[in-house]
Image: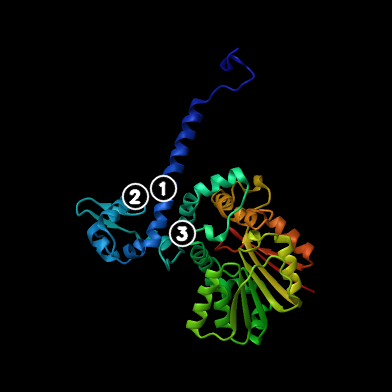
Amino acid sequence: MSLAANPALPAFDEAAAEAFAGRVMEILNDGAIAAMIAIGHRSGLFDTLARMPPATSVEIARAAELNERYVREWLAVMVTARILTYHPGGKTYEFPDEHAAWLTRGGTLGNLAVYGQFVAVIGALQDKILDRLESGNGLAYDDYPHFHGMMAEDSGQTVTARLVDTILPLAEGISDRLEAGIDVLDAGCGRGASLIALAERFPKSRFVGYDLGADAIAFARKVVEEKGLANIRFEARDLTGYDEKERFDFITTFDAVHDQKDPAEFVRGLFGALRPGGVYLMQDIGGSACLENNLDFPLAAFLYAVSFTHCMPVSLGQGGAGLGTMWGWETAVAFLEAAGFTGIDRTVLPHDPMNVWFVSRKD
């Protein structure tokens, strides 16, 4: 009996198939656009365009100090993506203010072009990921081009820019304690921009940043030296088995816990490093541990893709569990409770629906 004649099988829906083909073509088109957005960000083309009136490709290339032929082809992508406006009469390209507000450094609404870089990196890692699909092995931070730069730009928007006015008030009383002078750790600090901002704002407090990436730590130390800060230090350190005892009054982690070899052990280590009365502020991805709850979560597919190509392999590369980016706020709460933290508060901030903030304390 043919499949078509089997009444137990649903009839093939030609309209649904056509609609799905259209969806796939949209995905392919948008994926290419995302990679080109990364080029526009890293090359400075978006920033150059935002400073110019409608201009020709020659004028834009000259202003950006880039090759005109390459610039012209990139401009064509941006026009067909409806990011730039093209005026055929004068062959000029215009960057609407409403678009520049979302795609430039210092954009008034935030710089979404930063995240185009993650799409580009996913493509660059394809061969390594295909190999890991067979072997089950992980990756190391050194396998990711421009990783710490991307993370610093992301953190600069979601954390550093809002740190004093929006984020610290989530932990009641911590700003006053920082003013008076306490000991602070940022575990998994990356290039340390948030910790440096705190050190500048609260000169009576003492700040320490740990991160596995030696290049990120070197970058942070250079910034500290340039700023002449005496109340902060950075150390390249593998935090696996972290076990300092009652050394800090305030500990922060920004998008760092789920990447660890053993996140539960890591959180227990942070609990032990706090003095009684200490506060732990954790930022992480705010998705659920249950896939079915993430169907409408902002950029869920993007985050699972980042997990597949970065967060999960990095953990596996350390011999860890590979929880991944979407490990879930429920898992985070369970780890905090198991470590001994009390008074756990969970907050999602209006400016950043992808992340969740936990404030917890050590009695």
Q: Position of residue 23 (x, y in %)?
A: 47, 38
Query: Please, is residue 249 above or below residue 188 in the view?
Result: below
- Mark 3 and mark 2: span between their CA atoms? 17 Å
Tell me which residue sits at (79%, 62%) in the image. Answer: 338
Q: Is residue 170 left or right of residue 306?
A: right
Tag 1 near tag 2, CB within 8 Å: yes
Mark 2, Cα crowd under 10 Å, few <14 / some 14-19 / many 20+, is some
Mark 3 and mark 1 lie on one chain; the one further toward the N terminus is 1
Task: Assign the N terminus to one quadrant of the image.
Answer: top right
Give 158 or 155, whichever is nearer the viewer. Answer: 155
Question: Which residue is the site of mark 3?
Answer: 112
Q: Position of residue 101 (x, y in %)?
A: 41, 63
Query: Please, is residue 194 above or below residue 313 in the view?
Result: below
Question: Which residue is the site of mark 2?
Answer: 77
Q: How is the image coloured?
A: rainbow
Q: How many marks?
A: 3
